[in-house]
Image (cartoon, rainbow, N blue to C red):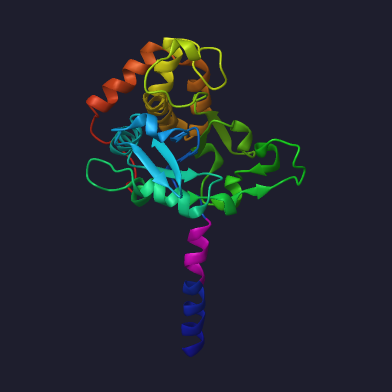
Amino acid sequence: MKLWLAILILILSFQPQAQATTPQSGFDIVFDIDWTTFYSIKNPNDHQGDKQIRVVEDKAYRHTDFLPEMIETLMQRHPDVRISFFSGGTKSRNETLLSQVHLSDGRSLLQIAHRVFSKDHLQVVSQDETLSFPSRFKKNLSLVMPEAAPTRTILIDDQTDFAVKPHKAVSSLGIFDYFKNYDSSMAGKPYAPASFEAWSMERNKALLWLAMLDTALENARAHGDLASEAQIQWNQRPQNRFTLEKGRTLIARPKAPACGRVF
């Protein structure tokens, strides 16, 4: 009798570890921070009165327009989605930034995040300092999120080269610095929009993400492949006013949560 009891206890003791490495049934969306969900503000004095400016570790940042609304809408429509963040910044910087942006119910992005990865989680693949940062370091989700199935996971990053197969990435669509208004005198300069339309799409890129992710998630429910569906949407539905208007509509009138597991 004691032998059977000992065997039962031994079996139960291994169950949590097995569950921890088993891929979950939900979907994972991993957002980059710098140049994706947050801008670095070079001259914060030029943005007096902007309540979205945050100073963290002596540097100023501003989150992408509609960032909290986009994430809140995704969570409402798709409760089986886990939101994570991965940045090459320090742990303290990343977590402080995320703690200062809130959803309508008062929760911060840090509180709702499934996982937050920082500089220490980057995989070093080269010591050659002449190479670009994404060529020397990688965001290897297989190492930091072994529970995230590659087909059910997508990384949104301005540098898609950060991704490591079998995981996939799509562009954050952001290629410019933050400009409160369109300044035609800046056209042609590095990291400045060349047209009003380009500036407008940059300011509204979170709405584009929302529209394309919503369609990708709905399609993925049929076969579970979010990664491929996201890439299809990013290729077939580029930055245009139709995708933008869908994003505006979703934020204004989020539907009841889609069927799925709630985490």
Of 43 and 244, nearer the camera is 43
Would you say the magenta stretch is mainly helix, strand or loop? helix
Give the total number of marks visible in the rendering: 0
Q: Tell me the quarter of the picture where residue 78 sits.
A: top left
Residue at image position (35%, 30%) is 47
Q: Quarter of the image holding residue 132?
A: top right
Where is 167 relative to 15, above or below?
above
Q: Decide whether residue 256 is among the magenta residues.
A: no
What is the x, y in percent for residue 173? 49, 24
Percent coordinates x, y for residue 93 in the rendering: 46, 50
Residue 15: say if magenta: yes
Residue 168 versus residue 239: which sits nearer the camera?
239
Nearer-the-camera pick, 160 or 19: 160
Residue at 35% over, 29% down: 65
Report the side of 162 relative to 15 (left or right).
right
Q: Where does residue 197 sit, x and y in percent of width and height?
A: 42, 11
Q: On the image, which quarter does residue 101 sit in?
A: top left
Is 49 left, or right, of 129 in this rendering?
left
Q: Which residues are magenta?
A: 14-21
Left/right of residue 143 with respect to residue 30 in the rendered view: right
